[in-house]
Image (cartoon, rainbow, N blue to C red):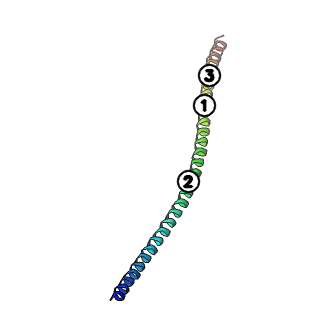
Amino acid sequence: MKSSSLEVALEETKEKEKELSQCLNNVTEEKKNLEDVYTNSVEKLAETENLLEVLRNELNATQQRLEGIENDLNAAGVKESEVMEKLKSVEEQLEQQGRVLEQAIARSIAA
């Protein structure tokens, strides 16, 4: 009778060991899956950080080009203003010289 209860206990122990082994295998597989996900996430994070650095560098270069263009436009605006002032001055001089010339012609005709 005792051997039969020992056999039952042994069988239950074997069954429990089988269940625990299966559970351990499941946990080990899940751990491996989580490690793979973690590794992939770390790699993607590194790629994203590299891409972000490239984009930051491109943004800085673009901002510098934009500042250069703004400076060129400001310089062109100043030059345009200077040219317009000179043209206005020349126009006034031409008008004055035209009046002087008209007066000289009128005097020479009257004389």
The amino acid pointed to by label 3 is Ser
- Cα–Cα span, label 1 and label 2: 46 Å
N-terminal of the pair, mark 1 or mark 3, is 1
- Residue named by callout 3: 89
- Image position of 1 with respect to 42: above or below: below
Please, what is the three-letter code of the amino acid marked with disc 1? Glu
Label 3 to label 2, Cα distance in Å? 59 Å
Q: Image point 53% across, 57% down: which residue? A: 45
Residue 106 vertical position relative to residue 42 in the rendered view, above or below: above
Residue 74, given in percent of the width and then of the height, sits at: 59, 33
State the mark number for residue 62. none
Q: Earlier in the sequence, mark 3 or mark 2?
A: 2
Helix or strand or loop: what does disc 2 sit on?
helix
Query: Of tags 1 and 3, which is closer to the observer?
Result: 1
Quick one: 13 or 29, which is closer to the camera?
13
User: Whole-Å distance between the Cαs marked 1 and 3?
Assistant: 14 Å
The residue pinned by badge 2 equals 49
Q: Amino acid at mark 2?
A: Glu
Q: Earlier in the sequence, mark 1 or mark 2?
A: 2
Please tell me which residue lies in front, 98 or 84.
84
Q: Are marks 3 and 2 in contact (CB under 8 Å)?
A: no
User: Which residue extends farthest top?
Assistant: 111
In terms of secondary structure, where does tag 3 sit?
helix
The spot of residue 14 in percent (x, y) is 41, 82
Classify mark 3: residues with Cα within 10 Å, few (<14), some (14-19) or many (20+): few
Closer to the eye: label 1 or 2: 2
Quadrant placement of the C terminus: top right
- What residue sits 34% from the left and 85% below the top? 5
Circle 1 is placed at which residue position?
80
Q: Nearer the viewer, residue 97 or 39?
A: 39
Q: Using a 10 Å C-alpha cutoff, classify the residue at mark 2 as few (fewer than 14 neighbours), some (14 to 19) or many (20 or more).
A: few
